Structures are given as C-alpha cells and as structure tokens.
C-alpha cells in the first residue's frame, strides 16, 4: 500500500559512477531521467555530500547503469555506504567502459557513458546534465528495478 503521493512516482534504480585517476566512485540513484532526445542527454540529481558528485565535478564525466531486479544487493551496497568509507568497486565485478573509461558493474541491463555538459542547483540537490557519447544494451531480457521510496527508506 502506498503511504503518500511520492511513493507512486515511477523511477528506476541505477548506478551512477565516475572516476578520476585511480579513484572510482559510484552510488545508487533513483533520480535519473532522459533530458534531451537530439542530442541524447541524461540528467541525474545528486546530493552535495555524495563523493560521486565531487568526482563528477572534477572528471566531468559519469555513467548511468540500469540495475536488474537480481541486483538489489548491489543497489544496497552503493546506496547505503559512501565511497569515502569503502571501495565499493572492490566488492563487485566490474569492467571499464570503452569510451570514457568509467567503471561499469558486470551484468547490468544497460549502461550509458556521459560527458558533463551542464549543472544547476535544484533545492538540496544538484542536477548534472550529461551528453550521452556511448550506450550499450547488455541484457535485452533484463528486468529493471522499480523504485518506490517505501521499499528503501
Ligand atoms: C534506492 C536508492 C536510491 C537513491 N537515489 C539517490 C539519488 O537519486 N540521488 C542521490 O544523491 N542519492 C541517492 N541515494 C543515496 C546515495 O546512493 C547514497 O547517499 C550513497 O551512499 C552515496 O555514495 P557516495 O558518497 O559514494 O557518492 C539513493 C539510495 C538508494 C538506496
């Protein structure tokens, strides 16, 4: 049963990652959307305390990865711990994306590589707008996780 109107907003559950030098950062994000059709762009809303946001600011690149229903544990790992405390990518199998060399979790349904082209403040979050420079569908039969606030917080 839904507790309030926000519970019914339909979103997915994604990994947003970035890297600079040897440092890899990534978090779980629900606030992800396509923000342009031509050229194709994706926007993500991140809180200012997120290490991943700091790394995106420096590297000016990020990935968006679509998690499968079977990957809820990965969503918990990336969503409940900060890259400041632990190296999350040391705990999962991952590979480097071909274009922007971003860390991608193995077995995600699909991923997008984005160059940061703009950002703006949105209340207590920052919206990062990325130009999609590469995208790949890895599992056409995958089933994305549907996000509802009541399941996670
Ligand atoms: C299901 C789920 C969805 C989340 N969505 C977002 C989001 O859209 N934006 C955000 O800034 N944080 C979101 N978070 C919280 C971050 O994933 C969390 O604060 C994370 O520990 C930050 O990691 P970092 O410091 O390594 O960047 C979400 C967490 C969960 C579990």
Image (tube, helix red, strand yellow):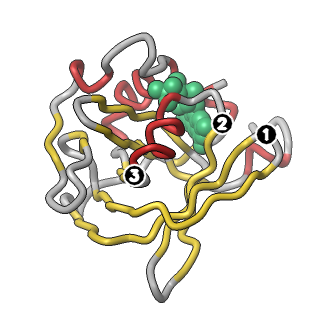
Residue at image x 56%, y 30%? 50
State the image coordinates of residue 141 (x, y, percent, origin top left). 24, 61
Could you give the CA–CA distance between mark 1 and mark 2, rounded to whole angstroms?
7 Å
Residue placed under numbered mark 1 in the picture: 124
Vertical arrangement, residue 22 with respect to residue 10, above or below = above
Asked if labels 2 and 1 touch by Cβ distance under 8 angstroms, the answer is yes
Figure quarter occupied by ligand 1: top right
Mark nearer the N terminus (1 vs 2): 2
Q: How many marks?
A: 3
State the image coordinates of residue 135 (x, y, percent, origin top left). 28, 68
Residue placed under numbered mark 3 in the picture: 62
For the residue labelled by badge 3, is the local secondary structure a helix, a strand or a loop? strand
Inspect this view and state whether residue 79 appears.
Answer: no
Residue at image x 75%, y 52%? 121
Mark nearer the N terminus (3 vs 2): 2
State the image coordinates of residue 107 (x, y, percent, origin top left). 20, 44
Considering depth in this image, is 84 or 91 the residue closer to the camera? 84
Q: Residue 18 falls in which quadrant of the image?
A: top left
Considering depth in this image, is 19 or 72 the residue closer to the camera? 19
């Amino acid at each position: 049963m839904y507790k309030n109107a926000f519970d019914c907003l339909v979103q997915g559950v994604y990994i947003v990652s970035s890297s600079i030098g040897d440092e890899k950062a990534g978090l779980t994000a629900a606030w992800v959307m396509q923000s342009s059709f031509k050229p194709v762009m994706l926007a993500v809303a991140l809180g200012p305390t997120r290490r991943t946001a700091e790394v995106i600011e420096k590297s000016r690149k990020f990935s968006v990865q679509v998690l499968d229903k079977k990957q809820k544990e990965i969503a918990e790992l990336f969503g409940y711990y900060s890259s400041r405390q632990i190296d999350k990518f040391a705990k999962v199998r991952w590979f480097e994306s071909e274009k922007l060399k971003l860390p991608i979790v193995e077995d995600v349904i699909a991923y997008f590589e984005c160059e940061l082209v703009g950002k703006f403040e949105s209340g207590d979050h920052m919206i990062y707008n990325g130009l999609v420079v590469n995208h790949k569908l890895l599992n056409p039969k995958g089933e994305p996780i549907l996000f509802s606030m009541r399941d996670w917080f």
